[in-house]
Image: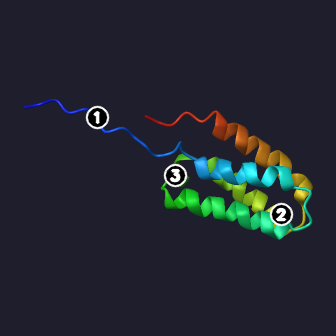
Amino acid sequence: MAIQDAVPDIRPRAGHDLLAGIEDVLPRLGDPDEAELAENLMTALVRCAACGDISRVREQADAIRRAAALLRDGEAEETGPILRQARTDLLTFAPLV
């Protein structure tokens, strides 16, 4: 019986789509169209869920939901710190083995 090489995991890092959404929204927080920014964050959440990553980055996903709600409520100044913390957490995330 031949030994087979392990199949590599080619999926992006857990939370990749959340990180992409954060990176898209953070520099635009001062924009007048906060509803569009909230929509971009929700799109990132949907893409993350479609990849099955939500359970691996639950806290960061919850932070994105809070940030999107704040943007929809017109409270962009409170959104920045939440997104920056989520970005830091995602960048330092070590996936479970």
The circle drawn on residue 22 is none
Horizontally, is 28 left or right of 12 in the view? Answer: right
Q: Which of 62 and 18 is in front in this view?
A: 18
- Counting from the top left corner in percent of width and height, residue 2 is at 11, 31
Q: Earlier in the sequence, mark 2 or mark 1?
A: 1
Seen at 79% across and 68% down, the residue is 36
Mark 3 neighbour class, 10 Å CA radius: few under 14, some 14 to 19, many 20 or more: many
Kind of residue indicated by mark 1: Ala
What residue did someone put label 2 on? 71
Mark 1 neighbour class, 10 Å CA radius: few under 14, some 14 to 19, many 20 or more: few
Seen at 81% across and 50% down, the residue is 26
What residue did someone put label 3 on? 53
Q: Is mark 1 on a helix, strand or loop?
A: loop
Q: Is mark 2 on a helix, strand or loop?
A: helix
The quarter of the image holding the N terminus is top left
Q: In which quarter of the image is residue 75?
A: bottom right
Is residue 27 depicted above or below 31 in this figure? above
Disc 2 and disc 3: Cα gap in Å?
24 Å
The circle drawn on residue 6 is 1
Q: Foreground mark, 3 or 1?
A: 1
Q: Which of 8 and 34 is in front in this view?
A: 8
Seen at 78% across and 55% down, the residue is 25
- Counting from the top left corner in percent of width and height, residue 3 is at 16, 29
Horizontally, is 34 left or right of 94 in the view? Answer: right
Check whether the beta carbons of the residues at disc 2 and disc 1 lie within 8 A of each other. no
Kind of residue indicated by mark 2: Leu
